[in-house]
Amino acid sequence: MITELPSGSLIAEAADMIEAAGLTVVSTGAGMSRESGVRTFRGEDGFWREYRAEDLASLEGIRKNPALVWEWYGERLKACQELEPHAGYYALARIQNGKGILPLITQNVDGLHQKAGIKDVIELHGSLRTASCLDCCGAPGVPMTEDLFEELPPRCSCGSILRPDVVLFGEQLPEQALKRAFRLADSCDLMMVIGTSMVVYPASSLPLIVLRRGVKVIEINPEETSLSSLDGTLSLRGAAGSVLPEIVKAVYG
C-alpha cells in the first residue's frame, strides 16, 4: 500500500477542480472508516469469527438468535462510539462549509461523517445509530443508547424485538437514498470518490455515470482500483486522512 502523498501538482490540480466546480458530490466507502480504526466483520477477532456474516446481519439471524445478534451489534456500536473521525473527515467538512453545499453519499454506517460535522449525508447502507421495530408496529428511529442494551434483545414499546437500521443481507437499499444518489450522479459537476474499492454495487456505478456524462472524477485511495485509469479520473494515491487536508490547504490556504 502506498502511504506517501501525491505530488504537489496533483494536489493543486484537484484543488483547482474543486474550486471551479459547481455542484460537487462526494462518495465514500469502507476505506474512509478504516483509517479511523473501524473494523470490518472479517477483521473481528476471536468469538465472532465463528459465525458467518449472514448469521449476524440478516433478518433470519435476528429472528433465530436475537440476543446473539444484538450482542454483536452492541459491541460494534460501542467500538464506533469510541472512535474519532480522522483529519480527512474534517477536511471534507471544511470543503462543505466553503462551497455551501456538498452532498455526501456513503456506504458506511458508523456515523463518523456526522461526528465530524458533515451535513447532508446520504447513507446507502443505513445507520448503526438507530433501530426500528421488527414487526407490525414499525416504530422508526429509536436511538441506539446504552440503556437500549441493558436487556438483550432490546424491544420496542409494543413488545416486539428491535432491529438495527442497517441494510441487512437480502434487503434492498433504502429507496429514497438510492434515488437521490443516482440523481446527484446525473447532475453533479464533479464527484470525489474516497476510500472505496469500486467493487460494491450500486455505489461503484455512480462515478461511472459521472464519467459517461463527460464530468470529471477525483479518486483518493491508497491502492489502484478499476476507476483509476479511466479517462476523466484524477487518481490520487494516498490515505484520505493525509491527502484531503493537503487539498484543503491548496483551496483555502
Image (cartoon, grey):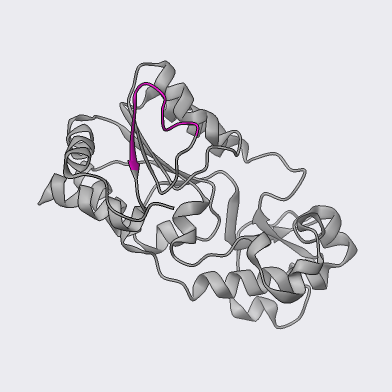
Q: Is residue 167 left or right of residue 242?
A: right
| Residue 165 in the image, given as x and y percentages of width and height | 65, 56
Which residue: 60% across, 59% down?
141
For the question of whether residue 175 can be seen, the reply is yes
**Residue found at the very far top of the displayed protein:** 213
Is residue 234 rendered magenta in the image?
Answer: yes
- Camera-side residue: 93 or 207? 207
Give the residue furthest to the right: 64
Where residue 55 sits, quadrant-wise, is: bottom right
Seen at 24% across and 53% down, the residue is 94
On the image, the x and y values in percent for residue 152 come to: 77, 77
Compare residues 121 and 13 and report the one nearer the observer.
Answer: 13
Q: Position of residue 231 (x, y in %)?
A: 37, 21
Predominant SS of the magenta segment: loop
Q: Is residue 19 left or right of residue 164?
A: left
Q: In the rendered image, which quarter is residue 65 located in?
A: bottom right
Decide: is 136 above or below 101.
below
From the viewer's side, name the closer residue of 72 and 103: 72
Magenta-highlighted residues: 226-236
Could you tell whether 184 is left or right of 7 in the image? right
Identified at 74% across, 67% down, the residue is 156
Q: Nearer the viewer, residue 193 or 65?
A: 193
Horizontal side, residue 83 vs residue 158: left or right: left
Give the residue drawn at x 81%, y 68%: 50
